[in-house]
Image (tube, rainbow, N blue to C red):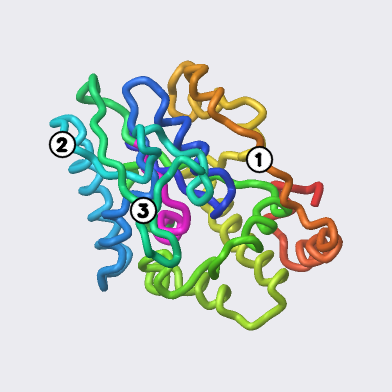
Amino acid sequence: MPDILVTGLPRAGSAVVSALLDYLPDTVSLNSPPFQSAFAARPLEIMPFCKWLIGDSVLTRRMLLTKEPMGDHRAPDAAPLFDGLYDPRQKFKPDTLPKEPELVYFLREGLTPDFMLAMRFTTLYTSVLPTLIKFEHFKILAVIRHPLDVIASWQRMPQPLFAAGNPPGIARFWPELLTLAEASTDPLENFVQLYEMFLGRYHELRDHIDIVKFEDIIENPHRVASHARAQTLPEAAVARIEPRPNLRNKAQIAKLRDAVKKYGVFTKIYYPDI
């Protein structure tokens, strides 16, 4: 089984998919590895970064097998987080704005030499996806979710969705996305176009990646196991999934649908009900 990268639309549920993978036997799934953020901030281009990412997966496997403590964004008991921003179990460093989560160092006992390693990052992996798939090293899952839910979540974020330094490397790895994010257009239309840019990238690369609908995972969480070629999820993992609050802004639904009709070529392929 190749290593797995979990990517997808920000706030679409990739953290849920990553957490469920972590519950599979003989599997470790890392949540937005901080060392990858740090390396992406260096002044390097896409090809060197992709080569480094493959090497990093090899090093990470070795560290886990030799029982070196691994730092990750997790709950204090080293359980995986089901929400990258709002999971109440995570701790934050004091006096940091915006709040920066503390790393939890953990060991994973009983891994076999060919255990499955998964790593999750949304925009960072998506930014380099066209180059990354050429190496054929990773199995890649791209998590998508209904635009009404994703965009409603984006509207509630306490800081800009994208900026030159967030995530690291975006200005070099995906400058078109950053240009669109910083455009002085109608905010709602801007979000629809950003959503469409993500979905368009996944659709164009659909022969090389698995496009995973969050709604399908919530309906049947065991589908995550099938993407990892495992038989089934432990019930303890399924029990951890909590209902997501309905964030849809009823007052803006009509305007959002108008914007999707204008820009949403790929959106309408995956969510024709919009």
Q: Amino acid at mark 3?
A: Leu
- Position above or below: 221 against 150: above
Residue carrying label 1: 244
Segment colored magenta: 118-129
Q: Residue furthest front?
A: 94
Q: Does the magenta-highlighted stretch encompass residue 119?
A: yes
Alpha-carbon span between mark 2 and mark 1: 35 Å
Residue 11 drawn at (x, y percent): 57, 51
Q: Earlier in the sequence, mark 3 or mark 2?
A: 2
Residue carrying label 3: 132
Please tell me how crowded label 3 is: few (under 14), some (14-19), or many (20+) other residues with Cα within 10 Å. many
- Position above or below: 202 against 47: above
Q: Amino acid at mark 2?
A: Glu
Q: Which mark is residue 93?
A: none
Please tell me how crowded label 2 is: few (under 14), some (14-19), or many (20+) other residues with Cα within 10 Å. some
Does dot 2 land on a helix, a strand or a loop? loop
Residue carrying label 2: 68
Cβ atoms at labels 1 and 3 below 8 Å apart: no
